[in-house]
Image (cartoon, grey):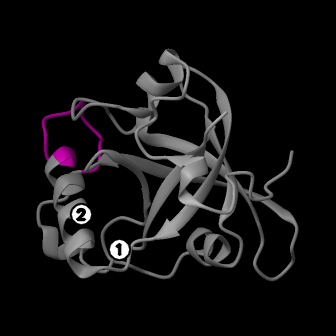
Amino acid sequence: MSTSDTTGPDDSARDTSLSHLPDPIRRAIEITPAAGTRERIIDITTLGRRTGRLRRIEIFFYRAAGATYLCSGAGGAATGWYANLLAHPGFTFHLKNGIRADLPARATPVTDPAERRAVLAEIVADLNQPHDPGTIRPTRLEDWADSRLMRVTFRRP
């Protein structure tokens, strides 16, 4: 399994719309507000920032503003996955619940305050929808303001 950056050197090789992915995979990523916690869990395989060795990490993903994001959640504490993706943005996105797929991807940190606020507001609103019991239920956008946030782009064939 390789986590080298296979998305290409420029944005023309990447796609946030998912239109190039097979329908079952696209549908699994374009989850709805009714999705529970389990459907939002994936693994990523990235290179460790210090060791350079492959690391597989379980994480939540979200769809917001027409793109796919990895987010640390409320609180904004430092996370190993975020540091690893800053050092090595090419990674493998593993769908593992329901449909299974290993997708070469690239992570880009979302640093623009307006974009961060809009995406986090959509994530929080989505998670505040009625779900099955036991799902994450953030109540305030302010709790998520310092979250680590990465936009995911997938390789076009």
The three-letter amino acid code for the residue at tag 2 is Leu
Disc number placed over residue 124 in the picture, else none: none
| Residue 18 to residue 27: above or below | below
Residue identifier under label 1? 147
Circle 1 packing at 10 Å, graded few (<14), some (14-19), many (20+), is many
> Could you say whether the residue bearing mark 2 is in a helix, strand or loop?
helix
Q: Nearer the viewer, residue 16 or 41?
A: 16
Amino acid at dot 1: Ser
Asked which secondary structure carries label 1, the reply is loop
| Quadrant where the C terminus is found in the figure | top right
* Disc 2 and disc 1 in contact, CB within 8 angstroms: yes
Q: Is residue 127 magenta?
A: yes
Looking at the magenta stretch, what is its main secondary structure? loop
Q: What numbered label is drawn on residue 120?
A: 2
Position of residue 24 in the picture relative to residue 37 (left or right): right
Question: In what quadrant of the picture does the N terminus appear?
Answer: top right
Query: What stretch of residues is rendered in magenta?
Result: 126-136
Residue appearing at x 62%, y 46% in the figure: 43
x, y (%) of residue 88? Answer: 71, 71
State the image coordinates of residue 116 (x, y, percent, origin top left): 27, 71
Taking the image as shown, residue 62 lies to the left or right of residue 52, namely left
Query: 46 or 5: nearer the eye?
Result: 5
- Describe residue 130's horizontal placement relative to residue 147 as left or right: left
Q: Position of residue 10 (x, y in %)?
A: 60, 61
Q: Indicate yes or no whether the magenta region holds residue 68.
A: no
The residue sitting at 88% across, 67% down in the picture is: 53
* Residue at x 61%, y 57% (from the top left corner): 106
Left/right of residue 65 with respect to residue 26 in the rendered view: left
Residue 102: image quadrant is top right
| Rendering coords of residue 2 (x, y %) | 85, 50
Tell me which label, 2 or 1, sits earlier in the chain: 2
